[in-house]
Image (tube, rainbow, N blue to C red):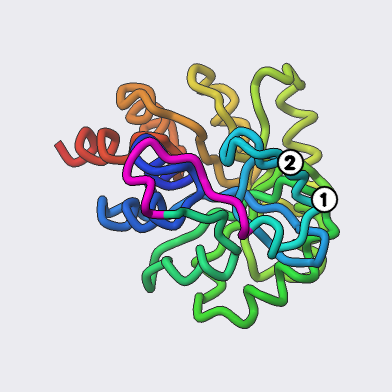
């Protein structure tokens, strides 16, 4: 599966509705977005803990209401008349076509789980369209405890330098369905994850040669900033 990282973020602002809509037009299998909980219990799609990088105005997400955040405009080098806003989870979910997937990266803690699961249960998506991902083991554990029907992947960056076996043991303890990492060179790591009965997924891979190698090793999905090039290379 090819997953668009924060949508087509080379063209449109990351995590914006146009970025996600453009992803579907490219024929991706899924999109990946980042989600935080607001002060008033709403869920918004934004990577950072504050808005400064993407809006040029600083507001702390968990100190702000949805109304506060919707008053801001996403920075965009294109048509300034688009007046792009930080989208909510429900707005992003509405873009997902039948049969396609959304990878929901939780950027805060397990306190987001109750409203998240409530909103997802009311959406038109089937459970197999939804994947929860997080670097926070408590988030993954909470998902699997409360709603085991959803797949949940434990995120890991190789910069952490953890022992692979220890990481796999933790993933199994929290009932994760798989591990998603930025590993580009260790087939041993991929083999260990798969041998443990877990799914192996890859992020954020923008080099087509690396993507093809990881697919050959057994990676089920490639999350990328450049889905168009990766899809073209795979199909070519």
Q: Secondary structure at mark 1?
A: loop
- For disc 1, the neighbor class at 10 Å (few under 14, some 14 to 19, many from 20) is some
- Residue 56 at x, y percent in the picture: 60, 35
Q: Are marks 2 and 1 in contact (CB under 8 Å)?
A: no
Closest to the observer, 75 or 136: 75
Extreme residue in the left direction: 236
Q: Residue at x 85, y 59 (%)?
A: 111
Closest to the observer, 86 or 184: 86
For the stretch drawn in magenta, what is the main secondary structure?
loop
Between disc 2 and disc 1, whose residue precedes?
2
Q: Which disc, if any, is residue 109?
A: 1
Q: Secondary structure at mark 2?
A: loop
114 magenta-colored: no
- Residue 187 at x, y percent in the picture: 51, 23
- For disc 2, the neighbor class at 10 Å (few under 14, some 14 to 19, many from 20) is some
Viewer-side label of 2, 1: 2
Query: Quick check: can you spot residue 194?
Result: no
Residue identified by numbered label 2: 49
Task: Classify 43 as above or below 147.
Answer: above
Image quadrant in which you'd find residue 112? bottom right
- Residue 12 at x, y percent in the picture: 38, 43
Query: Quick check: can you spot residue 116?
Result: yes
């Amino acid at each position: 599966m090819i997953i668009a990282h924060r949508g087509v973020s080379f063209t449109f602002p990351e995590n914006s509705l146009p970025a996600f809509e453009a992803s579907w037009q490219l024929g991706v299998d899924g999109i990946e977005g980042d989600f935080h909980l607001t002060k008033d219990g709403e869920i918004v799609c934004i990577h950072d803990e504050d808005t400064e990088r993407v809006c040029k105005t600083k507001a702390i997400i968990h100190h702000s209401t949805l109304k506060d955040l919707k008053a801001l405009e996403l920075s965009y080098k294109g048509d300034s008349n688009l007046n792009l806003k930080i989208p909510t989870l429900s707005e992003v979910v509405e873009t997902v076509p039948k049969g396609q997937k959304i990878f929901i990266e939780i950027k805060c803690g397990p306190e987001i789980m109750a409203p998240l699961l409530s909103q997802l249960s009311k959406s038109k998506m089937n459970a197999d369209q939804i994947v929860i991902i997080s670097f926070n083991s408590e988030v993954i554990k909470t998902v699997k405890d409360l709603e085991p029907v959803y797949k949940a992947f434990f995120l890991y960056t190789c910069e952490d330098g953890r022992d692979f076996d220890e990481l796999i043991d933790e993933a199994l303890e929290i009932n994760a369905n798989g591990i998603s990492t930025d590993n580009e060179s260790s087939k041993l790591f991929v083999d260990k994850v798969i041998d443990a009965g877990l799914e192996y997924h890859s992020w954020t891979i923008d080099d087509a040669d690396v993507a093809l190698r990881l697919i050959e090793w057994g990676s089920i999905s490639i999350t990328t900033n450049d889905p168009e090039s990766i899809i073209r290379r795979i199909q070519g």
